[in-house]
Image (spheres, helix red, strand yellow):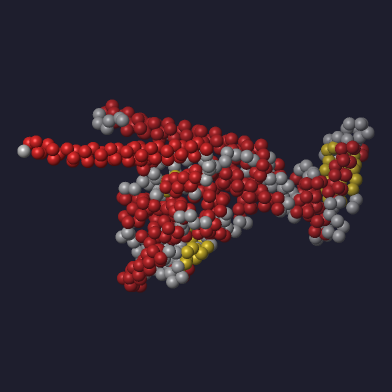
Amino acid sequence: MKGSTYRRCSCRDPKTGKELGTSCPKRNSRNHCTYSVRQELSPREGGTRRSFARGGYGSLKTAQADLDHVRALLGLADSDDPEGTELIAEMLAEVSRERSPLPEVEETRRRLNSGQDLIGSLTVAEWLDRWLAGKRIRKSGLNRYETDIRVHLKPRIGDRRLDRLRVSHLSEMFTEIRDANAQILEDNAQRRAAIDELATVPWKGTEHRARRRAMKAAIDEMPPFRRITGPATRQHVKATLRAALNDAIGQQIITFNPAAHMEIDPVRKPKALVWTDERVAKWEQTGEKPSPVMVWTPEQTGAFLDFVAEDRLYAMWHLIAFRGLRRGEACGQPWSETNLDTHFLTVSSQLVQDGWEVEASDPKTDSGSRVVALDDDTVDVLKRHGERQGKAREKWGTAWVETGHVFTQEDGSWLHPGKVTDLFERLVAASGLPPIRLHDLRHGAATLMLAADIDIKIVSDTLGHSDTRITRDIYQSVLPHVGKSAAEATAKLVPLQRKAEAEKAARKAAKAAKAAKKAKTKDQAKRKKKDKVKMPKKQSSQQ
């Protein structure tokens, strides 16, 4: 296709207003005219011509360089690729119309080969929207991604070009989040101090009422109480961005994922601690829990189950305490997957909470779909629960909601996981036992199985973990008596010289004590015998 550079004079005849062109008397002056380029492009579908045209170049050299640039872009499409030829021609026509800079050849080649738009630069926000729209996951997970994108990613890096996103930009983003956390903590402290001070101001008296009104107005002007972005949330924000950028790499939109090379503070998951007597005593004094994750001893678990024996959902508390089902799994367990004759149930679904809405979903992970063995006592508990549910079904009649779930509301409808948690917390408070979360009953089930010397693989499978390391890292809270037994067994395996000498000395001391006791006993016997011999003489003398 034809293309050329040419010189152009923009001077006009003052009388007619037309361009003078080649008749301009100053045309031959060195710096008077400018240079222009024109390159023919492939015709449109209707056969009409189109071209790339641009003027205003100060020298022939710069004009020729742009013409070569245009021809290099046209050469990206093979002669037998009409679609590629059309895309590049349309791109150059738009660049000419908009007077925008010519795109780089290699960037255009990459976009053309990956099927991307040749015009425009994709921003992080645009890609995140496109990526989120294409996700096909459960609603709760989708909402979590949406929150990360809306609250953290878009406001801070959304306007940056996707292909120019760097690790330094992410470092700045997380620094801003930490700074915002510090400001939130300061604002919360100021608001709390103001509220506490307001509580000390008396209600009666004109002066006091005026002061209270002024203080309330000042409090209203303060930022509301807010939650900080904790380590776990920051890790999730990073994971969301990393997943989105990995998909962009997969579609050949970018070649580098800065989120994969961004280091942020790790999340330190709290270890489960057992409510020992000492910890219970301190909790009773201060009201503070030693750890966010606390586990009952077997005696405390038994006391709780005895306390809630008449509760309508006793069977669920029992099942979670002994078999470690998750809250959503217990709420969504169907009778069709609960075989009491063979002492097994299959975890195949769960109820998840999205905001305050509840929806049915698959288990949390692939390993969450599992078969759980049931002991005789648990089977008896579930049988009695089923009988009570049958009576309730007859009582409600046509108003009964048939969900097929093992655990339901009074009318048979779904249990709300959030309400189940609230009920459990009220029952724990009423029992007088030290507090634990509902999920901590699952921790307790794992701890009891480990304390019973159940193989770690069986414990992991029962809980639905994908790896036994998860079980070890999170749930292996050793009960005090189990730890003591392990310590004694370990100590006996190591022969120590000082221990042997101590045992020898102890045996020698015991032998000496035994001999001394024997000698003492013998001596006492002799004295007793001697006293018996003397007694008759004494009696005869008295007579």
Expressed as whole percent of the image width and height from the top left, the position of residue 525 reads: 25, 41
Q: Nearer the viewer, residue 529 or 250?
A: 529
Expressed as whole percent of the image width and height from the top left, the position of residue 312 reads: 34, 61
Q: Nearer the viewer, residue 124 or 472?
A: 472
Q: Is residue 269 left or right of residue 200?
A: right
- Residue at left offset 57%, top offset 46%: 236
Q: Quadrant of residue 387?
A: bottom left
- Residue at left offset 43%, top offset 60%: 331
Residue 21 seen anywhere in this rendered image of the structure: no
- Can you name the residue that lies furthest to the left here? 543
Q: Nearer the viewer, residue 121 or 374?
A: 374
- Residue at left offset 52%, top offset 58%: 458
- Can you name the residue that lies furthest to the right here? 28
Expressed as whole percent of the image width and height from the top left, the position of residue 272 reads: 46, 46
Assign the C terminus to one quadrant of the image: top left
Q: Is residue 6 left or right of residue 246?
A: right
Q: Quadrant of residue 61?
A: top right
Q: Is residue 189 left or right of residue 232?
A: left
Q: Nearer the viewer, residue 134 or 98?
A: 134
Q: Quadrant of residue 385?
A: bottom left
How many marks overall?
0
Residue 448 seen anywhere in this rendered image of the structure: yes
- Residue at left offset 40%, top offset 34%: 192
Q: Is residue 169 left or right of residue 202?
A: right
Expressed as whole percent of the image width and height from the top left, the position of residue 486 reads: 48, 47
